[in-house]
Image: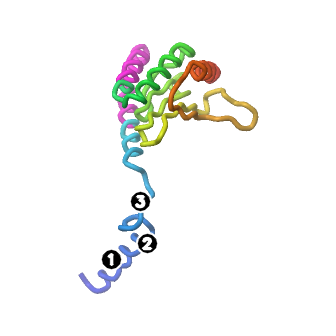
Amino acid sequence: MTNTQRTTKSATKSARTTTGTVTADKTYDGFTDEERGAMKERAKELKAAPRRGSRTAKADGDSEVRAKIAGMQEADRALAGRIHDLVRASAPDLAPKLWYGMPAYARDGKVVCFFQSAQKFKTRYATLGFSDLAKLDDGAMWPSAYALTELNADDEARIGELIKRAAD
């Protein structure tokens, strides 16, 4: 290696370390391990989708969602199970499916709402989220996700109404 090559290599390495990609005192600002895992799960879901017929997709989706819920930690499993039951009762036309490895509910293949467990991205609470297809518009500003730590009867009634509105 010539001196010019060493200098160029050193300058390139120095430039990389000052931009935050590889240093001991800085963290990488890219995707987290959890985010990469979610993207890999989504890729698997997309590969599996064309193999299913439209008739079996809804049944397979329900069993996949139930299996995903069963694999969650206890607190998330209880919340996700209740949300699943509420969605199935409030909007039976929404088809259960996995979306980025999360239980989700779709109309015509497009996600309307989803449950994100706290363990998914190591957050302190689970989330019930709604896509832009959910018809929850209320003026110029409205919530599209709700933090969940526990559910009582009033919460369940409110969630049931939100899901009905979202699915219309």
**Which quarter of the image is occupied by the C terminus?**
top right
Is residue 64 inside the magenta stretch?
yes
* Residue 9, numbered circle: 1
Callout 2 secondary element = helix
**Which quarter of the image is occupied by the N terminus?**
bottom left
**On screen, residue 39 above or below 68:** below
**On screen, residue 62 above or below 127:** above
**Magenta part of the chain:** 43-67
Q: Closer to the observer: label 1 or label 3?
A: 3
* Residue 28, numbered circle: 3
In contact (CB < 8 Å): disc 3 and disc 2 = no
Among the two numbered marks 2 and 1 on one chain, the one whose residue lies closer to the N terminus: 1
Which color scheme is applied? rainbow
Spatial CA distance of label 1 from label 3 is 21 Å
* Residue 18, numbered circle: 2
Callout 1 secondary element = helix
In contact (CB < 8 Å): disc 2 and disc 1 = no
Q: Majority secondary structure of the magenta segment?
A: helix
Give the image location of residue 91, x and y in percent: 56, 16
Give the image location of residue 110, x and y in percent: 53, 28
Q: Closer to the observer: label 2 or label 1?
A: 2
Q: Is residue 3 left or right of residue 23?
A: left
Q: Nearer the viewer, residue 6 or 35?
A: 35
Disc 1 packing (10 Å; few <14; some 14–19; many ≥20) = few
Q: Is residue 37 left or right of residue 137?
A: left
Q: Residue at x 65, y 21 (%)?
A: 165
Under mark 1, the amino acid is Lys
Q: Nearer the viewer, residue 84 or 49?
A: 84
Is residue 21 inside the magenta stretch?
no
Among the two numbered marks 3 and 2 on one chain, the one whose residue lies closer to the N terminus: 2
